[in-house]
Amino acid sequence: MTVSTKEQAARPHGRVLILGIGNILWADEGFGVRVVEYLAARHHFPAPAELMDGGTQGLYLLPQLEGLDGLVIVDAIDFGLPPGTVHTVRGADVPSTIGARKMSLHQTGFQEVLALLDLRGHAPRKVALIGVQPVNMQDYGGGLTPPVAARVPEVAAAVLAMLAEDYDIHPIPRAPDATQDGAGLMTAAVSRTAYENGRPTEAEACRYGDPRVLTRMRG
């Protein structure tokens, strides 16, 4: 994959990307996405800072990650720690941690992304991973478990602190009445509040399907 000259010109110099990765359909695996959603709802991120819901895109993220000044990854990672524990990894330890501790296919894909960036000479100048030890990543259609959900504000605060300390970037808090789930990062149907409150019973899902997923497919 290559990045066009026009795309490169549209991106500010010294970009710092906060990337939430994971699959919101599998309970705690959606943690990284929910953290960037939380941040977007409460802060405005002026250039050169950017927020991105990376989902499970893997190699499709490559053009977005080339030539970054900084990359902050948020994800659910099996550190072998008590459930809900937050742990930060920096620098060269990030790819090896993702590779050794992967719990899902999206992490395998993202390890390849980091390796390709390095091979092509476009690796971020700084990279960090802020992860949480998940409780359950096998509950299809489920939301974050309570121990992991409780860490969303904590990890969001850790991201803000890292931006300030490492890059002198200070996102602007949104007015309380302007706070919105998702804030443009995702459709309303799968924002955390709507998604977790809208889960059908097993009987309803079996008979009619899951309207949260069907809404996104139709959208």
Image (cartoon, helix red, strand yellow):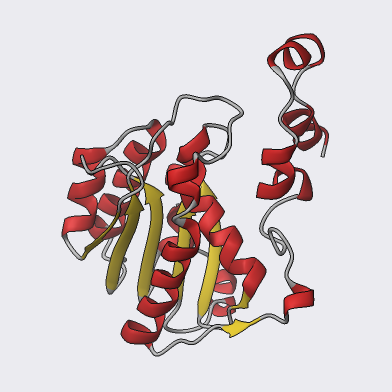
Q: Residue at x 70, y 43 (%)?
A: 190
Percent coordinates x, y for residue 184 in the rendering: 72, 62
**Which image quadrant is residue 207 in?**
top right
Percent coordinates x, y for residue 146 in the rendering: 49, 43
**Which image quadrant is residue 202 in?**
top right
Percent coordinates x, y for residue 87 in the rendering: 27, 57
Q: Residue at x 16, y 57 (%)?
A: 93
**Which quarter of the image is occupied by the C terminus?**
top right
Q: Residue at x 32, y 33 (%)?
A: 103
Picture mark count: 0
Foreground pick, 1 / 199: 199
**Which image quadrant is residue 99 in?**
top left
Q: Is residue 103 toward the left or the right of residue 18 in the image? A: left
Above or below, 96 against 168 in this view is above
Above or below, 34 against 48 in this view is above
Q: Do we see residue 39 in this rendering? A: yes
Q: Residue at x 36, y 47 (%)?
A: 84
Q: Do we see residue 56 in this rendering? A: no
Percent coordinates x, y for residue 187 in the rendering: 75, 50
